[in-house]
Image: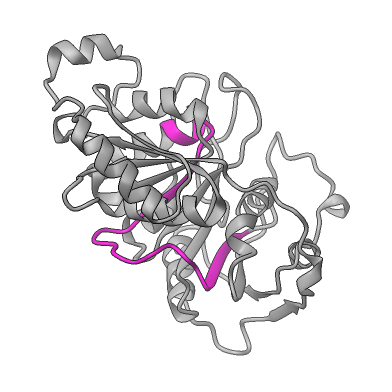
Amino acid sequence: MTMPAGNARMMSSDADADARLPLARPGDILALATSSDPWSPAVDAAITLAARWGANLTSCYVDPSLRHVDDPDLEPSVLGLLLQPRGEDDGECAAFASHAHRLGVREASWVVTRASIPLTLRVLGAWHDLAVIERDIAPGAHLFNILDEAMLASRLACLLLPPDWSTDVAPARMAIGWNGSIEAARAMHRALPFLQEAAEVRIIDGQEPHASDDDTTPAALRLDPLDYLRRHGVSAKSLRLDASPQQAGAALLQEAQHMHADLLVMGAYSHSHLRERVLGGATRHVLMHAQIPAALLDTHAAPRDCHCKRADLAFAP
């Protein structure tokens, strides 16, 4: 949402190039592939990132018959009896490895899953740092279950591509949803590999986080996000944006569009020992309507069986 000059307060932080500190980038990237002829957008994007960051790459083909199955507790052997996805093709494996190596990826492998996407992510997520997923790999409700499994059970950062995405993921302008919470701070920290490569970074500062039972961090201990980014060699500006929780998702997207952002960073946190895990309204709006890639970062460091909060966009309560 473009705000009048009187309602938007801009702050900036300058950063020196030599302030960039050595940073651990994702060493293992997973792409959920939906086609091999041509290579699907997630594969192309993952190849670009793996080549740029010197990461290993796994592309996992998901048969259409498995893309609507969202029960992560089914065993792969059971699914193998119920469904008949296509088998692994040696020629396809060789073609993918050759294609990835030609574009600069040092280690690349092609696998075919016979399990649901959530279960596949639970298994492969243990070996990877980042998953690249196409938004239209599954319809809305199934997509949220996939992301939920990736972030909560596997602790995977997710890069979600909008439909018909056909360009490299090399963001020059990035928007960060921010509300001053611990979750937002963790998301910013995990996004540093992207942020350090961007020419322009805008922190879209939404509402103050609501007090919660597990948020006991004194305000005095919270770092200034502009100062934090400066320490890592990232020059950023901050825009104060007033929006209600109901308008937060749309407002964030409008502001990202206004600055011509090509990547949006969001934090998420989880809820429920009963596995009643739901993405909040603001997150749903952003994920379903964003026309640019969205980096959705799990930010909860607690064990899976903890009593946590409902998954939602760190920009809004």
Viewer-closest of 251 and 101: 101
The correct choice, above or below, for 13 with respect to 252 in the image is below
Task: Please name the residue shown 19% across and 35% down the image.
Answer: 91
Residue 264, given in percent of the width and then of the height, sits at 49, 62
Which residue is situated farthest in the bottom direction here?
5
Q: Image check: 94 left or right of 249?
A: left
Q: Image check: 246 left or right of 199?
A: left
Task: Please name the residue shown 39% across and 56% down the image.
Answer: 103
Task: Please name the residue shown 52% across and 57% down the image.
Answer: 52
Q: How many marks?
A: 0
Residue 175, given in percent of the width and then of the height, sits at 54, 68
| Residue 284 seen in the figure | no
Q: Image check: 50 left or right of 76?
A: right
Viewer-closest of 28 and 149: 28
Viewer-closest of 131 and 242: 131
The correct choice, above or below, for 165 with respect to 68 in the image is below
Residue 239, given in percent of the width and then of the height, sits at 63, 75
Residue 4 quadrant: bottom right
Q: Is residue 162 magenta?
A: yes
Viewer-closest of 307 and 160: 160
Q: Is residue 31 magenta?
A: no
Identify the colour scheme used.
Answer: one colour
| Residue 260 seen in the figure | yes
Q: Report the magenta residues as a range.
A: 149-178
Task: Please name the residue shown 70% across and 34% down the image.
Answer: 213
Residue 123, given in percent of the width and then of the height, sits at 42, 22
